[in-house]
Image (tube, grey):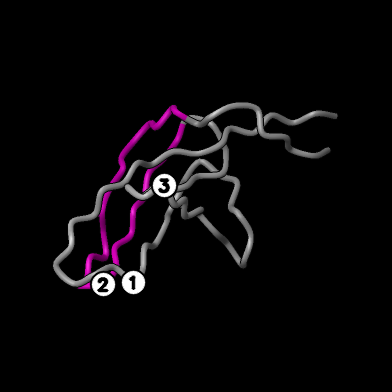
């Protein structure tokens, strides 16, 4: 059984929340209706994925820590993901 990317994960159930804010980092968290690979897309188009032990996390609870922010900058982001469909 292998998961295959089927479509964009656009069904955010709760959130997103911004937590653990410091001068150079922040954490974005949200819960989706369906399991998938969550990511935060920054204003410049860069995607930061929800990772667990070096791999993209497939879950409904998504958490992405954004590091190396410029001090005093404004963060513009979009939470999203890739919905997975399983084939047998």
78 or 36, nearer to the observer: 78
Q: Is mark 2 on a helix, strand or loop?
A: loop
Write the start and end of the magenta stretch as one range: 10-32
Q: Dots 1 and 3: beta carbons under 8 Å?
A: no
- In three-dimensional space, the C-alpha distance between marks 3 and 2, rounded to whole angstroms, equals 19 Å
- In three-dimensional space, the C-alpha distance between marks 2 and 1, rounded to whole angstroms, equals 5 Å
Decide: few, some or many residues near mark 2? Use Cα within 10 Å; few <14, some 14-19, many ≥20. few
In which quadrant of the rendered view does residue 16 lie? top left
Decide: few, some or many residues near mark 1? Use Cα within 10 Å; few <14, some 14-19, many ≥20. few
Secondary structure mainly formed by the magenta segment: strand
- Up the image or down, 21 lies above or below 5; here it is below
Q: In this view, does 74 lie to the left or right of 13?
A: left
Q: Which mark is residue 45?
A: 3
The residue shown at (62%, 66%) is 54
Which comes before the other along the chain, label 3 or label 2?
2
Residue 29 on image: x %, y %: 36, 50
86 or 41, nearer to the observer: 41
Q: In this view, does 8 lie to the left or right of 41?
A: right
The residue shown at (18%, 72%) is 71
Decide: few, some or many residues near mark 3? Use Cα within 10 Å; few <14, some 14-19, many ≥20. few
The residue shown at (80%, 28%) is 87
Q: Label 1, on which residue?
A: 68
Q: Dots 2 and 1: beta carbons under 8 Å?
A: yes
Q: In this view, does 49 lie to the left or right of 20?
A: right
**Labels 1, 3: front one:** 3
């Amino acid at each position: 059984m292998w998961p295959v990317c089927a479509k964009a994960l656009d069904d955010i159930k709760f959130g997103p929340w911004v937590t653990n804010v410091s001068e150079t980092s922040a954490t974005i968290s949200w819960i989706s209706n369906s399991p998938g690979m969550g990511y935060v897309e920054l204003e410049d188009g860069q995607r930061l994925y929800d990772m667990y032990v070096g791999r993209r996390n497939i879950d409904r609870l998504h958490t992405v820590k954004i590091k190396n922010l410029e001090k005093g900058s404004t963060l513009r982001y979009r939470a999203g993901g890739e919905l997975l469909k399983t084939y047998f």
